[in-house]
Image: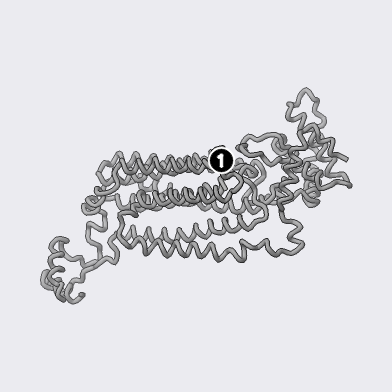
Amino acid sequence: MNSTAASIGHESHGHHGPVLQYQPGLPLSRGKLIMWLFLSTEIMFFAALLGSYVVLRFGAAVWPKPHHVHLSEPIGAFNTFVLICSSVTVVLALEAARANKRSLAKTWMLVTLVLGSLFLGVKAYEYSSKFDHGIYPWAPRGRIYERPDLYYGSAVRARLSDPAILAKMKELDARPEGELSDAELTGRRRLKQVRDMVNNPNQQAFDLAVVADQIMPLPGEGSDGHGHGGGLNDTFGWLQLPAVIPGGNMWASTYFFLTGFHAIHVIVGLIVFGILLLYELGPKRAGMIENAGLYWHFVDLVWIFLFPLLYLF
Amino acid sequence: MNNSETDSSSNVTHGPVTSHGELPEEIQTGGEDGEQSHEAHGGMMQYMAVFVALCFLTTMSFLTYSSYWPWKDEPQVGWAFMMAVSCTKALLVVLFFMHVLWEANWKYVLTIPAAMMAIFLAIMLIPDIGLRNRMVSQERALHMARGSDVLLLEKAASADSSDEVGKHEH
């Protein structure tokens, strides 16, 4: 084969010496080939993450319901919709670039960028609602307890004997009733009861369950977990008492790990789109847009599985 | 050797043989050829149809929450349904948006082994992680959440409508 190609080269460019013909192994550009190879490693990366999640979840004795951990299904569905829309716009940008409609391609690319940013914004809002309820991917992790047991009781007691908290509670007790809102009045009464309960040497398991419920009740089904009041931690933000979510720690680890890695992928995609926006998006850039699009569709794909696994199961 | 003729004829259509190991122009930039083959598929209407299907399927996952869902007591049915919906959505994205439907056979080489390894990976986690609660030390069992804890908390929540807390005090 080589000798044939060489001989042809010799015939056509006699004075240049032999020229070898390059035959691509696959009928696609190098950029696209590399992108697909990269995506096949990404399939395994996310499959490992999702697989671990599924195995951890179904192997756990107790796993929190989505509303127990303040997950809102409609918000998750909205984010799914946003990502699907952005997948469509990136395809439209590619089509426009191929048809040499440069400004249209740029507009679609910009819309994709905006939709991706919207997804991240919603995600940030969701994260902040977890942080508000003491669920963190980092310190202080110790605020979530698995069971309303003696260890939990002593953790609440320890927090309530913190000098700064004692001072705040003294301040609260000193305030006249007229100054306090209804929620604060109820909260003050509940806080006193919680203090009595955790300090009671004859406390029983059910007392501690009541304490946990007073501090941060597990929201019922249908509650969106946002602006949820009623718990002492919600009424008095400075309290930050330990809360009980059975299975909550493992849930938090998997949730932040999965959505965090997905969010990193979204950020990378947005950077790529930002760079693409600097260029004229004509047919010459179609290959670049296609590769960026392939990556973006993959990010969408991961979310298509993450959404039901995290929000609906 | 006998295909030297075809080679030379393809040379004519593809222009001169490149000496830098570069791809022919139309493959590298997705130029004319790519565009022509592209016009055969895709198209606005098709993308919109896929988009509508994806939105419809996303709404379908909510069906398991509605009162019309008949298998409320068997969550496994709902899970299987939602996974089927997700797989359908994923398939639509891969086939139409990622243009895999129109790619050559290399697509199987890249996707099938990766998918198989992904499945094996999850299966291999089952003995050590999935079944980790089958045998645990007593010490660990003491700190593990159980179904009874959830029941206890739910009971506490229903019992203590704020004003009745005093009743449970000693």
Q: Looking at this view, is A143 or A148 the one in front? A: A148
Q: On the rendered structure, is A244 left or right of A126?
A: right
The answer to which image quadrant residue B142 occupies is: bottom right
Query: Which chain does the numbered disc 1 sit on?
Result: B
In the displayed structure, does residue A223 sit left or right of residue B58? right
Q: Element under label 1?
A: helix
* Most foreground residue, A49 or B107: B107
Single out the residue that lies furthest toward the top: A178
Residue B6 drawn at (x, y percent):
14, 68
| Number of marks in the rendered image | 1
Residue at 63% across, 34% down: A227
Note whether residue B139 is visible: yes
Q: Residue at x 75, y 46 (%)?
A: B152
At 80% from the left edge and 43% from the top edge, which residue is drawn? A160
**Looking at this view, is A260 or A88 the one in front?**
A88
Amino acid identity at mark 1: Tyr
Rendering coords of residue B69 (x, y %)? 54, 41
Task: Please report the residue visible at 76 percent of the width from the left and 24 percent of the height from the top.
Answer: A179
x and y, in percent, of residue A129 in the image: 61, 40
Crowdedness near tag 1: few (<14), some (14–19) or many (≥20) residues, C-alpha within 10 Å:
few
Residue located beneath label 1 in the image: B65
What percent of the width, then of the height, locates residue A163?
80, 43
Residue A280 can be seen, yes or no: no
**Colour style of the rendered protein structure:** one colour
- Does residue B152 appear to the left or right of A247 in the view shown? right
Q: Quadrant of residue B102?
A: bottom left
Q: Quadrant of the image for the N terminus of chain A?
A: bottom left
